[in-house]
Amino acid sequence: MRKQSLEVLRPLGQLVVVGNASGEEDVMHSFNQIWFSNHQIAGFTLGGYSDSNPVETGNAAREALDILARNEIHAEIQEVYPLENAA
């Protein structure tokens, strides 16, 4: 998907990569191709960030849960699965 995303990204476009739930293997790209195409790539992984910034991650998680508890935002739950189906 990421390779296809880069192929259709217009000049000065930015691809934001968040997570890898699909488990797909990493795809190598030419930095020159990205540079000459005037593309930008940004990424974020919560696991990697929390390893190096545990205090900030914990504070942000507590704040997000507090906001949910105060009903300031609503989390849309699409479906509930039985616990015995958890991996």
Image (tube, rainbow, N blue to C red):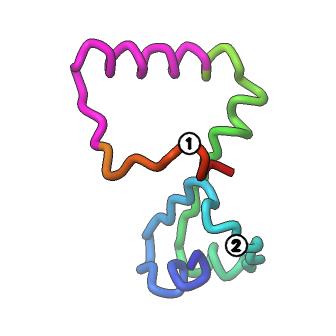
- For mark 2, what is the residue? 24
Q: Nearer the viewer, residue 52 or 64?
A: 64
| Residue that appears at 67% across and 82% down | 33
Q: Is residue 74 magenta?
A: yes
Nearer-N-terminus badge (1/2): 2
Decide whether the magenta segment is chiefly helix, strand or loop.
Answer: helix
Instruction: Name the image quarter holding the N terminus.
Output: bottom right
Comparing labels 1 and 2, the label whose residue is closer to the camera = 1
Q: Which residues are magenta?
A: 58-76
Residue 21: percent from left, percent from top: 61, 60
| CA–CA distance in space, label 1 to label 2 | 26 Å
Residue 71 is left or right of residue 78, and the answer is: left
Amino acid at the residue labelled 1 = Leu
Q: Is residue 66 magenta?
A: yes
| Residue that appears at 56% across and 59% down | 17
- For mark 1, what is the residue? 83
Residue 48: percent from left, percent from top: 73, 39
Residue 72 is left or right of residue 84, and the answer is: left
Q: Secondary structure at mark 1?
A: helix
